[in-house]
């Protein structure tokens, strides 16, 4: 159930109008890594990207975008047994930076001269987008993790726990 909700929220967030690079996709990948079973933690973000890239259009940096989200999901799997505010904040910060570094490396390989100056120009041009990526990751993760933990604390001993909570 949680995996389906993540998938629906992620698809909706990418195809509906939003500020550039202000989506919950990184947060959802990290959240899925922490709360979904290991298999779902990997395939839910990949399915999210596959569906939305078909809708939005294929692009040459897809392997880098998908690869960075796969790494962020693995980061979530790592964080699941170390779950506290500091670890999750660090994982979110690292995830946003990882996404920035990997996807812009892909942009350099596919859209810029393959020179040191081209690499530098690529990362400099991407800096304005990083602000939204980082801010959206921190905002959406605060909401996702906070809301999940709040709901979990309220329903953990009810008949709904097996539907909404991950063991």
Image: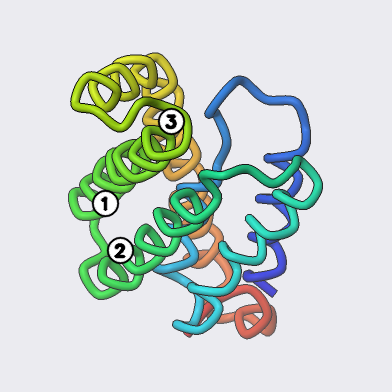
Q: Earlier in the sequence, mark 3 or mark 1?
A: 1
Residue tagged 3: 133
Quarter of the image for the N terminus: give it: bottom right
Q: Work out whether mark 3 precedes mark 2 in sequence or the reverse, and give the earlier one.
A: 2
Q: Secondary structure at mark 1?
A: helix
Q: Nearer the viewer, mark 3 or mark 1?
A: 3
Question: Left or right of 106: which side holds 84?
Answer: left
Q: Which residue is mark 2?
A: 75
User: Which residue is labeled 1 in the image?
Assistant: 91
Q: Given contact means CB atoms under 8 Å apart, are the residues at marks 1 and 2 in contact?
A: yes
Q: Quadrant of residue 70?
A: bottom left
Circle 3 residues within 10 Å: few <14, some 14–19, many ≥20: many
10 Å crowding of disc 2: few (<14), some (14-19), many (20+): many
Q: What secondary structure is found at the residue carrying circle 2?
A: helix
Asked if disc 3 and disc 1 are in contact, CB closer than 8 Å, the reply is no
Q: Position of residue 22 (x, y in %)?
A: 55, 28
Quick check: 1 left or right of 81? right
Q: Give residue 115's quadrant in the image.
A: top left
């Amino acid at each position: 159930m949680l995996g389906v909700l993540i998938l629906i929220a992620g698809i909706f967030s990418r195809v509906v109008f939003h500020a550039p690079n202000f989506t919950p996709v990184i947060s959802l990948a990290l959240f899925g890594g922490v709360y979904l079973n290991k298999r779902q933690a990997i395939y839910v973000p990949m399915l999210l990207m596959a569906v939305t890239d078909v809708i939005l259009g294929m692009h040459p940096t897809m392997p880098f975008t998908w690869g960075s989200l796969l790494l962020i999901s693995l980061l979530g799997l790592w964080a699941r047994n170390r779950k506290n505010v500091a670890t999750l904040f660090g994982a979110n910060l690292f995830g946003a930076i990882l996404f920035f570094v990997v996807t812009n490396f892909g942009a350099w390989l596919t859209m810029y001269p393959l020179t040191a100056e081209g690499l530098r120009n690529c990362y400099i041009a991407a800096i304005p987008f990083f602000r939204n990526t980082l801010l959206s990751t921190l905002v959406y993760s605060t909401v996702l993790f906070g809301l999940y933990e709040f709901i979990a604390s309220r329903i953990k001993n009810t008949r709904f726990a097996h539907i909404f909570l991950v063991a």
